[in-house]
Image: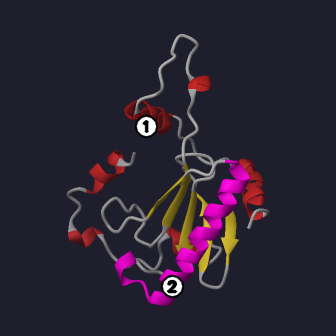
């Protein structure tokens, strides 16, 4: 699903990875950049992804800047785990879809050098989305192609509505 992103990082030089305290997530945490927040406590925020794989694609982010999951202090790792669980539960209720994918990358395929988890509702492709002439279930490759082609930037109004819907389930 993220092979295009992984390929972009395959030969990235080591110097390209750093502890950038001015990263986009740090700016969001400090309210210097906008984001549709769905959860927040003293250690963690959760926001809707601005280029979601699917409706409800949410990022769970520690407020403190850490580049690598393997270097998180235990208290922060626990707080992230708790927030991921809360967000995942709220998403399943808000979207009436219990299937999720939870991903956390470290360096390889990690586009923002700030630890974050992706909580992504599973696709709901079915025969009803196929053209009338098609009757076979989608192959995994076809499903991924349709998902990638169907990605669009998160609309601010839609984000507001969706964030309220998810928040109401927390």
Q: On the image, which quarter does residue 41 sit in?
A: bottom right
* Residue 131: mark in rendering: none
Question: In the picture provided, is 21 more to the left or to the right than 34?
Answer: left
Q: Residue at x 31, y 53 (%)?
A: 6
Residue labelled with disc 1: 144
Locate the N terminus by quadrant: top left
- Dot 1, how many residues are within 10 Å of its Cα: few (below 14), some (14-19), or many (20+)? some
Q: Does 70 appear in magenta?
A: yes
Q: On the image, which quarter does residue 33 sit in?
A: bottom right
Residue 92 x, y percent position in the rendering: 66, 55
Secondary structure under badge 2? helix
Magenta-highlighted residues: 68-96
Question: In the picture provided, is 49 more to the left or to the right than 158?
Answer: left
State the residue in front, 55 or 88: 88
Residue labelled with disc 2: 76
State the residue in front, 37 or 12: 37
Q: Residue at x 67, y 75 (%)?
A: 40
Secondary structure under badge 1? helix
State the residue in front, 16 or 115: 115
Q: Are marks 1 and 2 in contact (CB under 8 Å)?
A: no
Q: Does 95 appear in magenta?
A: yes
Q: Residue at x 64, y 48 (%)?
A: 97
Residue 140 x, y percent position in the rendering: 40, 35
């Amino acid at each position: 699903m993220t092979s295009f992103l992984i390929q972009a990082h395959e030969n990235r030089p080591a110097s390209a990875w750093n502890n950038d305290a001015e990263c986009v997530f740090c700016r969001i945490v400090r309210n210097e950049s906008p984001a549709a927040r769905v959860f927040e406590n003293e250690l963690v925020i959760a926001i809707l992804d601005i280029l979601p794989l699917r409706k409800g694609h949410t990022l769970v982010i520690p407020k403190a800047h850490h580049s690598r999951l393997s270097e998180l202090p235990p208290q922060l790792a626990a707080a992230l785990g708790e927030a991921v669980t809360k967000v995942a539960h709220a998403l399943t209720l808000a979207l009436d879809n219990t299937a999720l994918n939870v991903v956390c990358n470290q360096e390889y395929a990690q586009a923002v050098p700030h630890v974050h988890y992706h909580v992504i509702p599973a696709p709901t492709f079915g025969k009803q989305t196929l053209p009338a002439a098609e009757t076979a279930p989608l192959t995994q490759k076809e499903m991924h192609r349709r998902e990638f082609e169907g990605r669009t930037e998160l609309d601010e109004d839609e984000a507001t509505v969706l964030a309220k819907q998810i928040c109401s389930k927390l």
